[in-house]
Amino acid sequence: MLKVGLIGVGGISGAHIPAWDAMEDVELCALCDVRPERMEEYRDSKRCYTDLDTMLENEQLDILDICLPTYLHADTAIRVMDRGIHVLCEKPISLKMEDVKRVYDAAKRNRVCFMVAHVLRFWAEFELVKAIYEDGRYGKLLSGTMCRLNAWPLWSWDGWMSDEKRSGLVLYDLHVHDLDFLVYMLGKPNAITANRSLRADQDYMMATYTYDDFFITCEASWYAGRYPFSSSFRFQFEDAVVSFNQGVLVAYLRDGRVIKLMEQEGNSPDVLGLPDLGPYANEIRYFTDCVLAGKPADKIKPSELEEVIRLLDSFKK
Ligand SMILES: NC(=O)c1ccc[n+]([C@@H]2O[C@H](COP(=O)([O-])OP(=O)(O)OC[C@H]3O[C@@H](n4cnc5c(N)ncnc54)[C@H](O)[C@@H]3O)[C@@H](O)[C@H]2O)c1
């Protein structure tokens, strides 16, 4: 039974903790957060710490799940891997390019698994559009658009998300999801055209990534006010538009058919063979299986993480 600890019991831990708890071959036995009240509801089933070193001294952990604010990811991951512990770390790996090599060097010298939890790579609808692109069932890709909108995040601990130096704002916190997926699915773009409107309480960006035969536009926002979260995409292929909107993935075929792709029964090539775990559970399962098999968690590659930071850095120029 693998022993797991989790540090950073904030917003996203609410998706990770139940996913670990649902697994039968691991035990999420310890939590750590500087705010003891965040761990109150788990005290019956887990040992709780307010300091990482104390947790590491008291627990024999195989895996640490890092759900800390972004600016703490790389140094914490290296510190923990240097004690021989495998690390799953929330996105993004860092705001700094040089951290990618530092982190992967630490994983290599300690012979442990490291993975950034880029959850869209484990999200059934996103996996399916990637499969559609790769098998060409609807012809060649002509264009795409990806959209991720939210309100300015006022809820983060210590206001760290509102601090560009600690979170990277919309680019590194929100758009990084879609950009990582684009680099995963389509590789490096040839060119980027980017626009951004940044003020003290709102941040909006739009970018066009140009490839040889198609282009992809992306939007991301933290609007002022209580704008609701949404994530959507639309990929235009020669024979169909594949649209993900309000959680539903639909193919609008040029012959007039409209297909709800995730609802199809049987052995249609449109159906994805992923277990119904939910994306966070899928990524955690994948990482744990890599640890158990003693192989690198290389679905997410350091070269891809570096490419994403390089593209995000180009917004600053
Ligand atoms: N994959 C996703 O869908 C997704 C969604 C939201 C956030 N995230 C990422 O997850 C990370 C955390 O985001 P969040 O929204 O949960 O933030 P948050 O502010 O809600 O939570 C961070 C937690 O870390 C704790 N903390 C801070 N410093 C600490 C320390 N030194 N030791 C122990 N605990 C400490 C805070 O008390 C807080 O509870 C970010 O990097 C963010 O980009 C990912």
Image: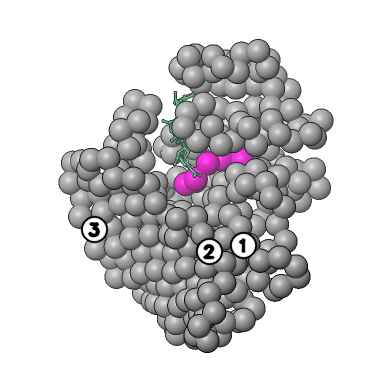
Q: Are marks 2 and 1 in contact (CB under 8 Å)?
A: yes
Secondary structure under the numbered disc 2 in the rendered image? strand
On the image, numbered disc 2 is attached to which residue? Answer: 249
Give percent across and percent down for residue 280.
60, 44
Residue 196 is marked as 3
Give percent across and percent down for residue 72.
46, 34
Cα–Cα gap, marks 2 and 1 = 7 Å
**Residue 308 vertical position relative to residue 238 in the rendered view, above or below:** above
Q: Are marks 1 and 3 in contact (CB under 8 Å)?
A: no
Secondary structure under the numbered disc 1 in the rendered image? helix
At label 3, the amino acid type is: Arg
Cα–Cα gap, marks 3 and 2 = 29 Å
Secondary structure under the numbered disc 3 in the rendered image? strand
Residue 262 is marked as 1
Q: Is residue 19 visible?
A: yes
Q: Residues within 10 Å of mark 1 (few under 14, many from 20)?
A: some
Q: Earlier in the sequence, mark 1 or mark 3?
A: 3
At label 2, the amino acid type is: Leu
Comparing marks 3 and 2, which lies closer to the viewer? 2
Tally the marks.
3
- In the image as oriented, which residue stretches furthest toward the left? 199
- Which range of residues does the magenta coloring cover? 88-93
Seen at 62% across and 47% down, the residue is 278
